[in-house]
Image: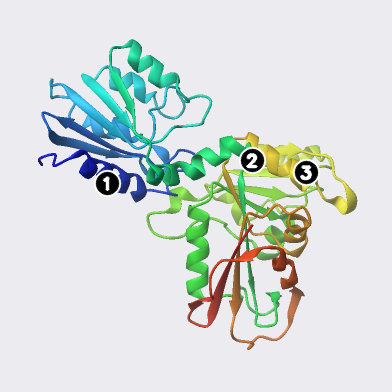
Amino acid sequence: MIQKNKDYIVKLVLNLSRLHAGLTGLNPSVGCIVTSNKKIISYGITGINGSPHAEKDALEKVKQLKIRKNLYVSLEPCHHTGKNPPCTAIISKSNVKKVFYYSKDLNPLVNQKGLIFLKQNKIKVKYFKNKKFDLISKFHNQYYQRKNLVVTGKVAVTKKNFTKNIDHKYISNIYSRKLTHLLRANHQALLVGVNTINDDNPYLNCRIRGLKELSPTVFIIDPKLRIKTNSNILKSSVKVFIIYTKKNKFKINQLNKKKIKVIKLPTIKKNFFDIKILVKIIGFLGYKNLLVEGGNNLLNQFFKNNLFNNFFFFKSNENRYKNNFFKFDSKKLISMKKINKPINLSNDNLFFYKN
């Protein structure tokens, strides 16, 4: 393919970076193009769940070609070892002569460090600021700018705003539930209370074909370690943290045998943790976004502390169920901005709110 002009390359790199947006786990979604003699010879995309990185993906395809190469990448290359090797090391060994990048990485492990390394290895580096690329990396960089994760809430209610029904497991229809699974795939961490686990026995994973690996890490608030050890969530492959306050050596040993991680925190009133501290701890563990699927008590704590950045409100248009309980107070959404008109999902409506 002949390289028509640099604008064409920019559009191509931009579109590649968008392909796996929200599907790359803790890593940003990156697009990469390799050229030689004014021809595109390879491309790369950050893999599902974050591996491999786009630069490695692109350069591996042409590693047998001993020719001079130029690299175009949506985000500055990483220079640290995590699940993946540093991209700068791969670039320096791949006969790359020039690197063009379109967005800066504010991660302190990356920011400018790799660029200095590349220059020391006689590779020319050039930055082209582009607002479209900044939008792609905005979610990744916001975490380092604010030192806090993005929090999204979600609730499903009946026509009269009840969240539970004795006779029916699901309040929402299959379309709403599928969208919930997509939400899980796009979030790195998920938070619920122990009552949700003990009452509903959910898996809390993403059950859409091809996206199971993107299931979020689950954090369970369980002050007195009341979780049932035969719960589905403890049998699944999903990574689980349990937040507790009252020590129970026997229960902790049981959980450790199941490779469940436990974190002890002090409670404040009525057996509740300080939610703000809990959110910070989840952020310190490296998670950049959090989906809260808890019951009314947990959701109320987040509303009270104004911690929601986004909120998905699924509401059924039908009122066919009896024996409903736990009413959600929709007035709490008044403090947030409604972004769209209701999205119709057959007999459900979806409302999206933002802070």
Nearer to us in this view, 199 or 75: 75
Per the image, the residue denoted by label 2 is 148
Residue drawn at (74%, 67%) of the image: 332
Left or right? Give the position of 106 relative to 263: left
Q: CA distance from mark 2 to mark 3?
A: 22 Å
Q: CA distance from mark 2 to mark 1?
A: 31 Å
Per the image, the residue denoted by label 3 is 244
Res 154 → quadrant: bottom right
Residue drawn at (55%, 72%) of the image: 350
**Label located before the other in sequence (2 or 1):** 1
Q: Secondary structure at mark 1?
A: helix
Q: Secondary structure at mark 3?
A: strand
Left or right? Give the position of 239 relative to 81: right
Amino acid type at circle 3 is Tyr
Q: Outermost residue, bottom direction?
A: 320
Left or right? Give the position of 55 relative to 289: left
Locate the N terminus by quadrant.
top left
